[in-house]
Image: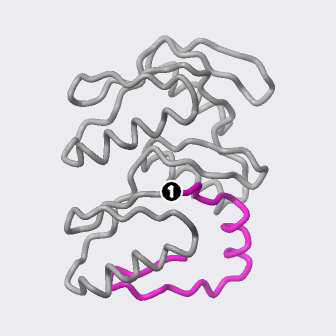
Amino acid sequence: MFFSAKGRQLKDTSEKGKRRRNKCFEFVFPVDFIMADQTLITLNSKEEWALIKEWHEANPDATERPELVFPVDVTLEDGTTQILMDRDELKGLKKSCKKGKDKRKCFKLILPVSFTMQDASVIEVNEKADFKLVREWKKANQAATVRLALNFLADIIYKDDTTATISNATEMQTAEDSCTD
């Protein structure tokens, strides 16, 4: 379900596109949004998407789109869960859905990993649930402009169960690019 900047629900006239999009991925709740007035809306279920619409109806002069707070989990059509760390990863996933091709990440991070935040604090992610700590930091530091940094060395596991050690951002980009080849 999508809404215009004025809160009007947009209709998808293409049943084929609607089916493909719905099958491609779904958000795992809770999902947080920062609204134009810097208020935070947390959606705990599909039914709560109406909260975004209600906010727009109460704020008709707002023109900025809600900002999704990352990281966010999505469930893919094959039933697996993927963690999207930023808007670029979400755009890539949406693009792969539109093309009907599997261009999602072909690997996952092997935990534990750690991230250095803009304020130089380090967040340790020892299990999947710990990604919530990153999301909470982002909510508490909405003015942060620098993207969080994965601390290397980091191990990844590919869909075929092979592993690799990534030692820098260039190697990570190469691994991500290999998923689309």
Query: What residue is disc 1 on?
Result: 30
In x, y percent, where is residue 136? 36, 42
Up/down of 27 relative to 164, above or below: below
**SS of the residue under disc 1:** loop
Q: Is residue 4 magenta?
A: yes
Which residue type carries mark 1?
Answer: Pro
Residue name at image x 59 percent, y 55 percent: 28
- Which percent across, then down, holds residue 88? 45, 47
Residue drawn at x 63%, y 38% as measured from the top left: 105
Tell me where residue 128 sits by quadrant: top right
Figure quadrant of the N terminus: bottom right
Q: Residue at x 63, y 60 (%)?
A: 26
Which residues are the magenta region?
1-30
Horizontal side, residue 25 vs residue 143: left or right? right
Residue 156's place in the image compared with 128, above or below, is: above
Query: How many numbered tags mark residues here?
Result: 1
Please provide percent x and percent y for residue 19: 73, 73
Closer to us: 61 or 167:
61
Quadrant holding the C terminus? top right
Q: Is residue 101 magenta?
A: no
Scheme by which the image is coloured: one colour
In the rendered structure, the answer to whether residue 63 lies left or right of residue 90 reads left
Disc 1 residue crowd, few under 14, some 14–19, many 20+, Cα 10 Å: few
| 85 relative position to 129: left or right | left
Residue 124: quadrant of the picture: top left
Of residue 24 and residue 136, the one placed in the foreground of this image is: 136
